[in-house]
Amino acid sequence: MTNPAHDQIKKTMTDHNVVLFMKGNPTFPQCGFSSQVVQILDYLDVDYHSVNVLEDMDIRQGIKEVNNWPTVPQVIVKGEFIGGCDIVREMFESGELKPFLTEKGVLSA
C-alpha cells in the first residue's frame, strides 16, 4: 500500500535540486534549527525549495520516515538526504558544504 505523503515527499525531492523540509518558511522560520539552516543556505546563495512541515502533519511525519531521521529540518540535495541542522552546520563550519554543493552542481564555483 502506498503512502500519499511519502509519494509527495519523494516527488518534491526529485523535482528540486535542493529541498529544505523545515518548520515555517525561509522568511519566517518557526524554530531555531530551521532558522540556522536557512541562514547557511542563504549565506552560500543556494537556490532551494522549502517545505513547511507545520502545514501538513502527514508530511511532517512522512519526511522522518522517508529519510529515517527523527527531526526537522532536513536538507536534501539532488534527491539525497544530507542531514539536519547539526550536520549542515558542521559541514559549513568545516568548509565542506560549499565544495559539496559545487560538486553536486547546485552552486556555482
Image (spheres, rainbow, N blue to C red):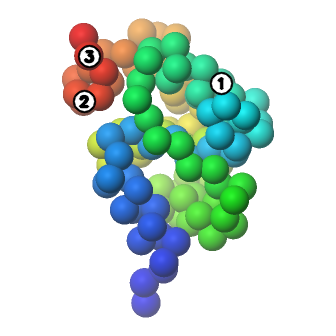
Q: Can you say which quadrant of the picture contains the C terminus?
A: top left
Can residue 109 be seen here? The reply is yes
C-alpha distance separating marks 1 and 3:
22 Å
Q: Residue furthest bottom?
A: 1
x and y, in percent, of residue 75 in the image: 48, 39
Q: Earlier in the sequence, mark 1 or mark 3?
A: 1
Whether residue 61 sits left or right of residue 102 in the image: it is right
The label nearer to you, 2 versus 3, is 3
**Residue type indicated by callout 3:** Ser
Q: Secondary structure at mark 2?
A: loop
Numbered tag placed on residue 104 in the rendering: 2
**Disc 1 designates what residue?**
36
C-alpha separation, residue under disc 2 versus residue under disc 3: 10 Å
Q: Amino acid at mark 1?
A: Gln
- For the residue labelled by badge 1, is the local secondary structure a helix, a strand or a loop? helix
Drawn side of residue 109 relative to residue 10, left or right:
left
Residue 72 visible in the displayed image: no
The quarter of the picture where the N terminus appears is bottom left
22, 100: nearer the viewer = 22
The numbered dot on residue 108 is 3
Residue drawn 48% across the image and 78% down it: 4
Q: Position of residue 18 (x, y in %)?
A: 39, 38
Which mark identifies residue 103?
none
User: Which tag is nearer the camera, tag 1 or tag 3?
Assistant: 3
